[in-house]
Image (cartoon, rainbow, N blue to C red):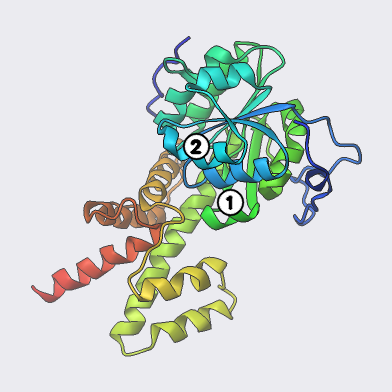
Amino acid sequence: MFCSHIPHHLNLAPMMIMKRFSAPISSYVSPRAEAITEPPARVGFLGIGIMGSPMANNLLKAGVDLTVWNRTKSKCDPLINLGAKYKPSPEEVTASCDVTFAMLADPQSALDVACGKHGAVNGMGPGKGYVDVSTVDGDTSKLISGHIKSTGALFLEAPVSGSKKPAEDGQLIFLTAGDKNLYETVASLLDVMGKSKFYLGDVGNGAAMKLVVNMIMGSMMASFSEGLLLSEKVGLDPDVLVQVVSQGAISAPMYSTKGPSMIQSLYPTAFPLKHQQKDLRLALGLAESVSQSTPIAAAANELYKVAKSHGLSDQDFSAVIEALKSKFQHSETK
């Protein structure tokens, strides 16, 4: 079975069950049930990259019977050494597992892995579930959902808010939508990998929420970069600026964690710049589809595109500051 192209416009260890749910009370946060739904016995994970690797590792540490796949098999080796099983195709993973998670880099990759040759759809069927934790647009998510559900299986989109370190620490935020029964079935697994989970209703809502969150984040980082450079230009100490910002009303963990390294022109990758630009592009498309003006995000997107043109795609998204440096340098030579 093949998908059409993207439209344009487990027996768990006790510690897993006992892990505390630290999210604040919200009408959108599914409360923890008194009796946890029996979790799936066999779990698959497709996509062992910057995010997928630590997420899968946390499942393994919780005692999950895990089967993994990645285009580059060597990325699976550390997990295999820790007890994970390996299958050579997404189809074989889903065929051998009750529930399969997928963490892919972009919409096309998510679509290819789900619906391409030897894709996950071919191994799905009644009684199985597919949880796509990739960041994609709503149309792609709905397309994948339709093909998964056509097999009689259940589908849940569950993009995450959080980067490499939260993934390692099991502190991600899951923005889920789709089959409520599957959400309840995998709730304890989400709790192993994250600190909170939101159920948002129909497929597409999770994708939309993630794009809005990352649109805000990308714009914030661009503005923060301007502030760091401006403070230095007028003779202020940018390190002091980070301290001031971190103690005021606009404080955000992102500023205090990334600011010091940005000042040193170091950008260790937690969230690749190319992915931030991709999310801004998708968010702008979402805004256009409902005729919502987003001029700040549009301007930020252009900066990330400039940074990509400077070869910074695989650096952390905080490297967007280099696009502003190049603009300043260019203006000084005029």
Q: Residue at x 84, y 48 (%)?
A: 18
- Left or right, 129 with reference to 243: right
Residue wearing tag 2: 76
Circle 1 or circle 2, nearest the eye: 2
Rendered-image quadrant of the C terminus: bottom left
Report whether residue 278 is seen: yes
Q: Residues within 10 Å of mark 1 (few under 14, many from 20)?
A: many
Spot occupied by residue 19 in the image (x, y as percentages of width and height): 79, 50
- In front: 4, or 170? 170
Q: Is residue 166 above or below residue 330?
A: above
Spot occupied by residue 322 in the image (x, y as percentages of width and height): 28, 65
Looking at this view, name the residue that lies furthest to the left. Answer: 334
Query: To which quarter of the image does residue 130 belong?
Result: top right
Q: Residue at x 61, y 11 (%)?
A: 151
Report whether residue 135 is seen: no
Spot occupied by residue 121 in the image (x, y as percentages of width and height): 54, 16
Mark before the other along the chain sequence, 1 or 2: 2
Residue 167 shows which numbered tag? 1
Three-letter amino acid code of the residue under disc 1: Ala
Residue 27 shows which numbered tag? none
Three-letter amino acid code of the residue under disc 2: Cys
Spot occupied by residue 180 in the image (x, y as percentages of width and height): 74, 29
In the rendered picture of this protein, how many numbered marks are placed on residues?
2
Query: To which quarter of the image does residue 92 belong?
Result: top right
Looking at this view, name the residue that lies furthest to the right. Answer: 34
